[in-house]
Image (cartoon, rainbow, N blue to C red):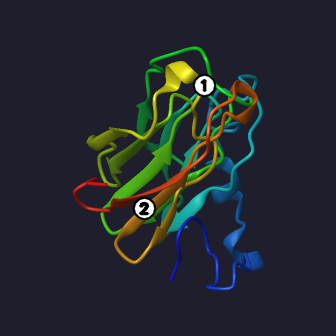
Amino acid sequence: DHLSSGNRTRTSWWITTLSALSSCSRSASPCRAGGPCSAGSFENTPVVVGNRAYVTTPFNTAIAYDLDTGKQLWRYEHKLGTTIYCCGPNNRGAAIHGPHVYMGTPDARLVALNATTGEVVWDNEVADPTYGYSITHAPLVVDNTVIVGVSGGEYGIRGHVTAYDAVTGKQ
């Protein structure tokens, strides 16, 4: 099974088999599938569950691909609420739990998407982005809890880690 964000063991070792790297899965990358490869830096690992891959882009787009066909299944583009964010345009990946895909955003939001349709299930402000708070890392899922921390120390913010119910989004 795939744990948290990616194919990771409980001791955080990332594993894959060479057979998982096929010409089809490579063709489903955002760069080969017509994605915005010139828009920022890609610092994430796609999350693969079954025959689907989920990837995020630097400017907060989550994309689902069918690995059997290489076709894009859906695309969600998060509209940034502020242009003040730490660390440049980075989104370091998604996490999966049951029917949901989770991603943090540079305007300090945690978004839950329906893994099948890409529709927003819930969208929470984790911290006030006007002070420089942002989320640049992939969320972590433990049991039924989605955990995120904030970035933005160069703006003088105080960091914190927050946990949310994976289904309801309640803190």
Q: Secondary structure at mark 2?
A: strand
- Side (left or right) of 45 relative to 6: right
Q: Which residue is mark 2?
A: 146
What amino acid does circle 1 point to?
A: Gly
User: Which numbered mark, 2 or 1, is in the foreground of this view?
Assistant: 1
Q: Nearer the viewer, residue 139 or 53?
A: 139
Q: Nearer the viewer, residue 125 or 159?
A: 159
Rendered location of residue 4, percent (x, y):
52, 70
Q: Which residue is mark 1?
A: 132
Sequence-wise first label, 2 or 1: 1
Sort mark 1 into few (<14), some (14-19) or many (20+) by Cα contacts within 10 Å.
many
- Side (left or right) of 60 relative to 44: left
Q: Is residue 16 above or below residue 91?
A: below
- Side (left or right) of 75 relative to 60: left
Residue 26 seen in the current view = yes
- Residue drawn at (59%, 53%) of the image: 138
Rendered location of residue 45, percent (x, y):
68, 56
